[in-house]
Image (cartoon, rainbow, N blue to C red):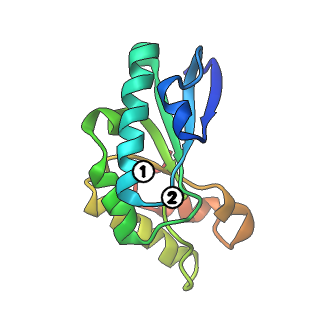
Amino acid sequence: SEIGINALVVRDEDVSEPSAGAAVVKVKVGKDPAEDAVRINAVAEAFAASRGPSARLRLDANQAWSLDEAARFLDGLSDHAAGMIEYLEEPLKWHPEGPDAFMRSWEELASRTRSRVRFAADESLTETDLNTEHLSACRAPIA
């Protein structure tokens, strides 16, 4: 799909005007799951109102959450916001037992949240033993 301009929303005041002309906005999450869900729901509404049906969100948690916290966040998203999300990047903390256990935790998160959104890897591909074979074998939805 064609992506015009990407924008990054990092401050609460950016919510009301998430970058005029951007088709995709990346938003950092990974603090309080309930507060993040409220914020993403607001960003989704504001962005959809200004961009229409082409508006998309990419979320990045930077491995901040436990399984329970990430599930609480995903369950707190409105259906409208969840439908706008292209992916949630690195939703869970790295698993000390390695890449297979890490991917199982993604599968568990997807199962607990009815696969509401797809996940994406970033830093775990360069900072750990995770590789594309692990991602291919994972049963969670991966972007």
Q: Quick one: 87 or 41, which is closer to the camera? A: 41
Q: Residue 72's image quarter?
A: bottom left
Residue 73 at what x, y percent from top left? 36, 56
In the picture, measured across the screen, residue 29 lies left or right of residue 140, that is: right
Q: Are marks 1 and 2 in contact (CB under 8 Å)?
A: yes
Q: Residue at x 35, y 45 (%)?
A: 38
In the picture, measured across the screen, residue 90 lies left or right of residue 55, that is: right
Q: Amino acid at mark 1?
A: Asp
Q: Residue at x 34, y 53 (%)?
A: 74
Residue 60 at what x, y percent from top left? 56, 50
Q: Residue at x 46, y 22 (%)?
A: 55
As measured in the structure, the alpha-carbon distance from the residue carrying label 1 to the one carrying label 2 is: 7 Å
Q: Residue 49's image quarter?
A: top left
Secondary structure at numbered mark 2: loop
Q: Earlier in the sequence, mark 1 or mark 2?
A: 2
Q: Which mark is residue 101?
A: none
Q: Residue at x 74, y 63 (%)?
A: 126
Name the residue beneath numbered marker 2.
Answer: 30
Q: Quick one: 87 or 73, which is closer to the camera? A: 73
Name the residue beneath numbered marker 1.
Answer: 36
For the N terminus, the image quarter is: top right
Q: Is residue 19 above or below residue 8?
A: above
